[in-house]
Image: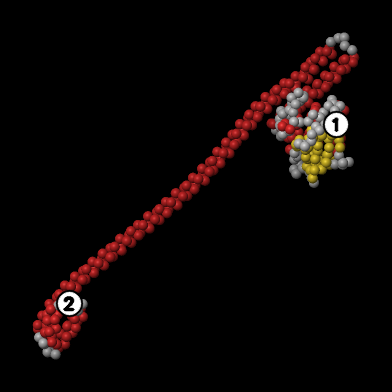
Amino acid sequence: MRRVFPLLFLLIAVFVNCIASSYLNNSDLWEKAERNIHEQKYDSAIVAYETLVSELDSIYKEINSTQVEDLRRTYSIDELELANSKEKNYLLQSTVRILSILMIVLFVCFIYLKYQKRKLIQSRIKLQNAKKMAEESVQNKSLFLSNMSHEIRTPLNALSGFSELLTSGGIDEMTRNQCNEIIQQNSKLLLDLLNDVVDVACTDIAQMSFEIKECNIIVLCQNVVNTLEGIKQTEANILFASPYPAFTIETDTVRLQQVFINLLVNATKFTKKGSIVLALDVEKEGVALFSITDTGSGIPKEQRERVFKRFEKANERVQGTGIGLSLCRDIIEHLGGKIWVDPDYEQGTRVFFTHPLKQNKLQ
């Protein structure tokens, strides 16, 4: 039993030494306990070690509580940082979502405003065009009434005066024939004016009817020239020129003949002497090129772009309603061609217009 105690004390001493050496290296109690073991005073050593263990226990508890508190504090800090990090992430995600939604809303608003602006611009353009058309319509109406009142008055006065002269007595047969001829001419003039008005009204209210079929244009042109040559009121010769003995195109014969007559009659008004030539050639493959060339007074350069507008007249003193050339333009464009005044011709007036040889769609 006495051998067990020294061994137990030795083990306790080693254990205590291992635990307390880092805390109590300079402690008198530790030295006293070691000295008692060397002197084999085990009772005193036990007391010393019990006291030392008690102090170590208090130190351990203090250290343990301090470390636990440090750990708890560290853990609390980590939890707080984690919570803050989560809150920051949530705020960041919310901000990103809100900004994305705002950007989408702003983009949609931008597109909508741009669309509305485009519609507003288009509406404004339409309104301006409608206003311009209304102003032109009022102006054209005034020009039409002015022209018609002037143009109709002349043949009506002639018809009234010479009809009254015919009914009076005491005139010879030659005078009677002259009066009859003048009445016939003015009747025809009045009828032509009314026909032009009816044609223009047709193009305004409903599209003119077109009957497309094959036509020998050489024969048509020659017949028109021969007819006008017989009833012309000018010393100028009306001629037809073409290198082709026969030439066929798809067209409305009546409407194209109307174009030829209007253009040639218009040329006779400004050409007292010289010649008026209707010519046919092929401008390019599939397109016929017509020209009416006269040696008359010509059209001023500033009026060449306006002569094909309705109620426009190159010379207000010349008889006419100002709708013949406009009607020619409408017919030619409907048939797929174009009409213009040659800007380089200076010996009078030369009018060109094109006509396709084949119509894309029979009307």
Which residue, given by chain and number where applicable, does mark 2 sit on? Answer: 24
Q: Which residue is pictured at 71% across the width and 28% down the height?
A: 311
Q: Which residue is pictured at 72% across the width and 21% down the height?
A: 149
* Up/down of 167 relative to 190, above or below: above
* Up/down of 227 relative to 246, above or below: above
Instruction: Please indicate whether residue 153 sits to the left or right of residue 36 in the image.
Output: right
Q: Which residue is pictured at 86% across the width and 37% down the height?
A: 241
Amino acid type of disc 1?
A: Ser
Of the 4 image quadrants, the one containing the N terminus is bottom left
Q: Residue furthest top?
A: 170
Asked if one can make out residue 326 in the rendered structure from this viewpoint, the answer is: no
Residue 38 percent location from the top left of the image: 13, 87
Residue 255 percent location from the top left of the image: 78, 34
Residue 154 percent location from the top left of the image: 77, 19
Label 2 neighbour load within 10 Å: few <14, some 14-19, many 20+:
some
Q: Is label 2 in a helix, a strand or a loop?
A: loop
Residue 237 percent location from the top left of the image: 87, 30
The alpha-carbon separation of the residues under discs 1 and 2 comes to 143 Å
In which quarter of the view is residue 172 placed? top right
Precedes in sequence: disc 1 or disc 2? 2
Of the 4 image quadrants, the one containing the C terminus is top right
In which quarter of the view is residue 52 placed? bottom left
In which quarter of the view is residue 24 placed? bottom left
User: Is residue 31 or residue 86 the one in the foreground?
Assistant: 31
Q: Is label 1 in a helix, a strand or a loop?
A: strand
Label 1 neighbour load within 10 Å: few <14, some 14-19, many 20+:
some
Instruction: Please indicate whether residue 135 sits to the left or right of residue 26 in the image.
Output: right
Q: Which residue is pictured at 76% across the width and 27% down the height?
A: 195
Which residue, given by chain and number where applicable, does mark 1 sit on? Answer: 275
Q: Are the residues flagged by discs 1 and 2 in contact, CB closer than 8 Å?
A: no
Amino acid type of disc 2?
A: Leu
User: Is residue 220 or residue 84 the one in the foreground?
Assistant: 84
